[in-house]
Image: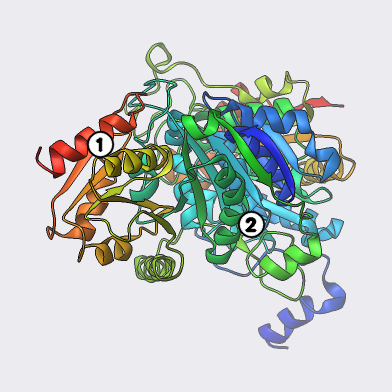
Amino acid sequence: MGDVRLMKGNEVIAEAAIRCGCDGYFGYPITPQSEIMETLMIRRPQEETGMVVLQAESEVAAINMVYGGASCGKKVMTSSSSPGISLKAEGITYLAGAELPALIVNIVRGGPGLGTIQPAQSDYFQAVKGGGHGDYKLIVLAPASVQEMNDFVDLSFKLAFKYLNPAMILSDGVIGQMMEKVELSDFKPRWTAEEIKKISGSWATIGKTADRERNISTSLDLDSAKQEIFNHKLQAKYRAMEENEVRFEKIACDDAEYLFVAYGSSARICQKAVEQAREKGIKVGLLRPITLFPYPTKAIQEMLKDVKGILSVEMSAGQMVEDVRLAVNGKVPVEHFGRYGGIIPTPEEVVEALEQKILGK
Amino acid sequence: MTATTEINKIISKENLVYGKTSVLLDNEMHYCPGCTHGVIHKVIAEVIDEMGIQDKTIGVSPVGCSVLAYNYIDIDWQQAAHGRAPALATATSRLMPGKYVFTYQGDGDLASIGCAEIIHACNRGENIVVFFVNNAIYGMTGGQMAPTTLEGQVTATTPYGRDCKVTGFPMKITEMIAMLPGTRFVTRQSAETPGAVRKLKKAAQKAFENTRENKGLSFIEIVGTCSSGWKLSPVKSNEWMKENMFAYYPLGTLKDE
């Protein structure tokens, strides 16, 4: 057993960043995620690992600092909550367009606009379908526990560097604020300049040496023919992610006649709802997407030979349900149940929604 | 002696007193005739060459005419979103101590959309160099009003001349920046004569030396021309600049600590 602690999800993001050899964090305060930067400031990783932590003047500046750091082949990250992520959207699409690895953490709160500081899952579209302009995708990981907040920091950097693409941890105020037992990762040293040269020297702006052409970190190509070819390359990368990186968890699915599909906090609630429904004799299982992009489309399709109906449960007015419907393609009924604006549904409500919307009681 | 052999003799190696730095690439420049960017690029490339810091210098190019600066100076480059270059440079400089990091920004990029980023990078005293090219107009998008556009100046979005009652006033952002304790060296230069170019080069050298000595932020405004945007010939542009721009944006060093 490693280093086991009782910690808040947000604190764990900070600790996991230090431990995975993150080089830089750039952020701006916003509820309900400010503990991430506060924890980093208390921990002073500059003295321990050399990690740079800087409070930027805005969300916009923070994500562009990430762009600068990522251009240098460094492991860099930012975190925010919904309104702040909207501000970062510009920088995020530039990161995707310049094929830069980086981690963006979104501890989602209810919207639209300034909305509420309470938890929500209403940024699914923004995270998965775009948010910024242009045809791009983020690798999106949805933790459902404080443990996964720890695990997904390192995983996000691995995937970001594997595909040279920004990755997002899409969490919410529940997971960010709640305390749970967590086994922290072991410390990994930050990459040395030599290691960075070996890993990212073909593209990173680390100083042009005589043995190579200059490296340019850019998303610009004024030649449309070249820009189209570049877009093909991006699309091929996204298809490769769909092929190789889909992650999901199935709970009580072996004999399931009905299915909940839910991620993050909603999946935790659905886990309890599964128990309660089964006590009533309803054979329901839970499919929990862990990657929201790439989405577990095939996993849902493989369930269709047994299940008679699916309830997508989200703390939104119905966003992920569209991806469930695309996967199901009309073969079985798919309905949505959600509470939003910062309201967290109870397992009882979820079971009731299943009975009414899917079982037709 | 034919004309060709005469020329070959004149340009023979022992007669050369000046050569193009290899840090300035041979790519054909997209800048309009009379534009100041080419001269400024040359000055920066020469300083990088003479200081022997090509392998340690990282440039950050803006959005605007000089977005493609990375095609001309042979170093590693980052291309920033509009106005955000100082944020990129902040992280780059902090994450890679010992490197020479500079931004190259126009007046729309730095003084309008990127006003927050430049003010805060200056206020933090980032160990970077900022080249701010002020030609009082948006060049690339077709000659619209910039924050630095002079009162009465005709642009695509002030077709009857800039009316300060409506648009606010030409912004002296360099004077604002000089007030910030985070800045060490703040100067306003030009590049329209050989003498001016020599002064600009000295300022650029000083700025990069400040980076070497970890002194903090050096800010060099270069008052330049935009013949296309101003709808004047290159010669007339220089005359207009001297008469109008230098009067409002006086040349000289505001701060050198």
Helix, strand or loop at mark 1: helix
| Residue A43 location (% of width, % of height) | 77, 33
Report the amino acid beneath label 2. Answer: Trp
| Count of numbered circles in the view | 2
Image mark for residue B191: none
Residue behind mark 1: A351
Which chain's residue wears label 2? Answer: B
- Please tell me which residue is depicted at 80% across the width and 65% down the height of the picture: A194
Do badges 2 and 1 share one subunit?
Answer: no
Please state which of residues B187 and A199 is positioned toward the viewer in this rendering: A199
Extreme-bottom residue of the structure: B1
Image mark for residue B77: 2
| Residue B155 location (% of width, % of height) | 38, 32
Query: Which circle, 2 or 1, is nearer the viewer?
Result: 1
- Please tell me which residue is depicted at 38% across the width and 36% down the height of the picture: A269
Crowding at dot 2, Cα within 10 Å, few <14 / some 14-19 / many 20+, comes out as: many
Helix, strand or loop at mark 2: strand
Report the amino acid beneath label 1. Answer: Val
Q: Is residue A27 above or below residue A152?
A: above
Res B185 quadrant in image: top right
Q: Is residue A351 left or right of residue A172?
A: left
Which chain's residue wears label 1? Answer: A
Quarter that holds the C terminus of chain A:
top left
Q: Is residue A251 above or below residue B169?
A: below
Please state which of residues A16 and A97 is positioned toward the viewer in this rendering: A16
Q: CA distance from mark 2 to mark 1?
A: 56 Å
| Residue A92 location (% of width, % of height) | 48, 46
Extreme-left residue of the structure: A360
Crowding at dot 1, Cα within 10 Å, few <14 / some 14-19 / many 20+, comes out as: many
Residue B188 visible to an observer of this rendering: no
Q: Is residue B220 left or right of residue A338?
A: right
Q: Is residue B257 left or right of residue B160?
A: right
